[in-house]
């Protein structure tokens, strides 16, 4: 039988679905996945002064601090993604002042380019110093801050899936607010059917495709945005300019792993349609669907939609 549970975790709606012999068995397994996501949230959150992230940021420009192997490895992978995206993905975005880009109704004009540029001065993944022997991290400049908003949900989905597999769940889906990882098959033996959200109508889909042992992540400007002079600006900030990106409504990444899918959705949005597609076409086993502001759809070479 298929059993589902919806929980608010990491400030987002998580839906966990597993197939098992009965409801109790499924429910127990889902509880293990929820506990795993909460454990990760406790380490990555910026809202608690007990978290690893908080301790790293507090010591920016002061001293290196020792961190758990798991977080060290995650940051190493973040650094690798920053390199291949030439900084379009960067976990040091945490220094951007929330008052500066609040994306609420009070925001009626864009800041001048000089002010925007100043806000991103501290964003530079190359100023993260990792010591592999000591397992320490040091943020080189005072005021630097890291955050895992661009990869955390995908990482949590992947770790929850791992926990479920270790505990005998052969088929399931962990959906972290649109960043999902699916494995195994439905009860009827068919692959899972995944819908891609229509960015104009939140609860409708424009296309579906069948997947197993695959992850999908979507980054869209329909969640948070402002319209200034009839132009829509999304909550995704280009780390190089300090300005929100425009022109793309949503980017969907299909990959083998939810962490990678989550981490690539934002940089493709920042790169723009052509550069983003060229970039994805160079990566093996990764597909991409982009919808622009005019509802045109663009597909990477290896996408086959039903």
Image (spheres, rainbow, N blue to C red):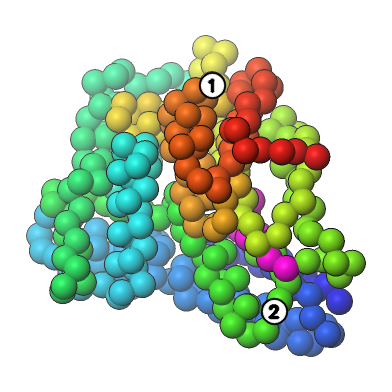
Task: Name the dominant secondary structure of the magenta segment.
Answer: strand
Q: CA distance from mark 2 to mark 1?
A: 41 Å
The residue beneath circle 2 is 169
**Around disc 2, counting alpha carbons within 10 Å, would you say few (fewer than 14), some (14 to 19), or many (20 or more)?**
many
Left/right of residue 149 with respect to residue 241 in the rendered view: right
Question: Residue at (13%, 52%) from the top-left corner?
Answer: 140
Residues at marks 2 and 1 touching, judged by CB atoms closer than 8 Å: no
Query: Where does the N terminus fall, quadrant-wise?
Result: bottom right
Q: Which residues are magenta?
A: 175-184
Instruction: Judge by depth and name the residue closer to the eye, 65 or 19.
Output: 19
Q: Residue furthest right?
A: 188
Image spot of residue 125 (x, y percent): 25, 46
Q: Can residue 236 be spotted in the picture?
A: no
Q: Can residue 208 be seen here?
A: yes
Which sits earlier in the primary sequence, circle 2 or circle 1? 2
- The residue at the point 30 percent across, 59 percent down is 76
Which quadrant holds residue 33?
bottom right
Residue highlighted by disc 1: 247
* Image quadrant in which you'd find residue 177: bottom right
Seen at 33% across and 66% down, the residue is: 73
177 is within the stretch colored magenta: yes
Q: Residue 21, relative to residue 151: is it above or below?
A: below
Q: Secondary structure at mark 2?
A: loop
Query: Which secondary structure lies at badge 1?
Result: loop
Q: Is residue 97 above or below residue 15?
A: above
Between 292 and 255, which is closer to the camera in this rendering? 255
């Amino acid at each position: 039988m298929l059993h589902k549970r919806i929980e608010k975790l990491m400030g987002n709606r998580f839906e966990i679905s597993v197939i098992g012999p009965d409801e109790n068995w499924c429910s127990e397994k889902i509880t293990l996945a929820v506990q795993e996501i909460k454990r990760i949230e406790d380490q990555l959150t910026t809202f608690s002064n007990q978290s690893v992230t908080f301790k790293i940021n507090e010591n920016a420009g002061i001293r290196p601090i020792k961190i758990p192997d798991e977080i060290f490895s995650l940051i190493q992978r973040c650094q690798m993604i920053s390199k291949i995206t030439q900084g379009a993905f960067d976990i040091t975005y945490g220094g951007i002042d929330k008052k500066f880009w609040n994306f609420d109704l009070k925001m009626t004009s864009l800041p001048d380019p000089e002010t925007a540029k100043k806000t991103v001065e501290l964003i530079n993944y190359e100023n993260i110093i990792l010591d592999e022997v000591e397992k320490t991290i040091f943020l080189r400049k005072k005021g630097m801050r890291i955050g895992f908003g661009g990869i955390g949900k995908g990482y949590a989905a992947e770790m929850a899936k791992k926990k479920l597999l270790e505990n005998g769940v052969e088929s399931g889906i962990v959906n972290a607010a649109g960043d999902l990882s699916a494995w195994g098959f439905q009860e009827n033996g068919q692959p899972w059917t995944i819908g891609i959200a229509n960015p104009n109508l939140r609860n409708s889909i424009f296309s579906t495709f069948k997947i197993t042992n695959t992850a999908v992540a979507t980054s869209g400007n329909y969640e948070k945005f402002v319209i200034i002079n009839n132009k829509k600006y999304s909550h995704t900030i280009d780390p190089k300019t300090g300005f929100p990106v425009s022109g793309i409504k949503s980017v969907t990444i299909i990959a083998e792993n939810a962490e990678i899918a989550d981490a690539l959705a934002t940089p493709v949005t920042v790169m723009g349609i052509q550069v983003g597609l060229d970039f994805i076409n160079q990566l093996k086993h990764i597909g991409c669907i982009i919808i622009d502001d005019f509802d045109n759809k663009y597909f990477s070479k290896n996408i086959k939609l039903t």
